[in-house]
Amino acid sequence: MTTDIKEVTDYLYKIPRFARTGGLSMTAERLKLLGNPQDTFKYIHVAGTNGKGSVCAFMERCLRKAGFKTGLFTSPHLVKINERIQIDRENVGDETFCRAFERVKALVDDQAAQGIAHPTFFEFIYLMAMVIFAEAGIEYGVIETGLGGRMDLTNVIQAPELTIITSIGRDHTAILGDTIGQIAGEKAGIIKSGIPVIYLDDKPEAARVIKRRADEVGAPAFPVEKEWIEDAQIRDGQIRFAFRCPYGQKYDIILNTSGIYQIENCSIALSAMEILRAREPELYALPAEAFRQMLTQAVEETRWAGRMERIRENIYVDGAHNDDGVRKLTESLRAAFKDRQIILVFAVAEDKDYQQMAAHLCTLPNLRRIIVTELDNGRRRDHREVMEDFSRKWHGNISGTYNVNKAIETAVHMMEPEDVLICTGSLYLVGHVKEMLGGI
């Protein structure tokens, strides 16, 4: 058995150079040959443009707080590939990861001998996750889609317990469509007949598409509306707000984050838990008040790396990487650091609409310095091109370097005691900063 995690990860990282997807039918066939591990646990399926990972984290903590053994499948990872597959919120160990790799690779090798195409990087790891979850005996698997929903390989499941759709924004337009409605249609492809769908009702165009799809397939639809969120305040790295959930109770919530966008992600998760409890009352025998207290404590305890994450004193990373995500990040920065000067380190992938992202960030009134750099991978966009765009929108101190380590070192060196350093634009940048600077 291959026990060297480096050998395994090297193999996996090379897959995109020769892989092509066989579609959902091939994924279903591979799962069948692996013993249909995805059918051994209750499957919570989460799609959306922004907030998927955070909603998954809130859901996982709530389910674990309720006493269930959980599996969590998300992407991308920030530092180590094992982050993508977690059991009870712990990354699976190298030995477990490698053992699942060997099992999937044996199947892939058998199929290759028959002329069947190699799975993609994402499908390979998804198959590994399903194998690991089944072997671990999890009770609930919280599964994040990779891209889209309708044709996403995680959508092979036929009967999830719940489907959840988070905020819809413009991203991956070359694949998912140019409009909010088209993108929402792809995300709504995870909705299944008779299975409740919980979705954020923040954009009318997206909400109409999701509700129409739910009606077409006969899925109970439960919107989560911003009007149910009251008295939101941010202070000392915490957010307090009230959530009046019409599917359950009123919640008075404390979140240990400065990212105000987590209010809506938390509200989605609370609504989903209320729907899940109504769907399976025998599994949640707690009285209503005890159930509310349990969920309140669970979301307060939830942490999700790379989203307004403080990794050192006054140094934060946020993986916002599209127009909508950066807009919400900017709102958070305005609220959390209105009396502090901000130094920004920014890098973006080549396929992103960085002009809109820059436009949002340049509205920050307390922006002191911008350092533009490049991702340390093949998806990098030339920092000089991005610098030019920032320069048209903001006339302060802007510099740049292709060397991401130099950019981070420069930013840290120039910080004054009351400054805040924000690193954003890509989850890959977040991972690099976390690996370089460590964490508190």
Image (cartoon, rainbow, N blue to C red):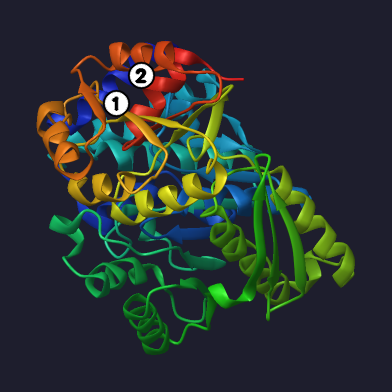
Q: Give me the residue at 61% from left, 67% from top.
A: 272
Instruction: Residue 404: give x, y in percent of width and height.
Output: 28, 17
Instruction: Residue 334: give x, y in percent of width and height.
Output: 48, 48
Whether pointer 1 and pointer 2 mark residues with C-beta atoms closer than 8 Å, the reply is yes
Q: Quadrant of residue 13?
A: top left
Instruction: Residue 414: give x, y in percent of width and height.
Output: 40, 14
Tag 2: amino acid? Val
> In this view of the protein, which residue sits in the foreground, 144 or 54?
54
Is 342 left, or right, of 384 in this rendering? right
Q: Is residue 38 above or below residue 226?
A: above
**Quarter that holds the N terminus:** top left
Q: Give me the residue at 45% from left, 87% from top.
A: 218
Q: Is residue 305 above or below residue 296?
A: above
Q: Is residue 171 above or below residue 211?
A: above
Q: Which mark is residue 12?
A: 1
Q: How many marks?
A: 2
Identify the residue position indicated by label 2 in the image. Answer: 8
**Quarter that holds the C terminus:** top right
> Taking the image as drawn, is residue 14 in sight?
yes
Tag 1: amino acid? Leu
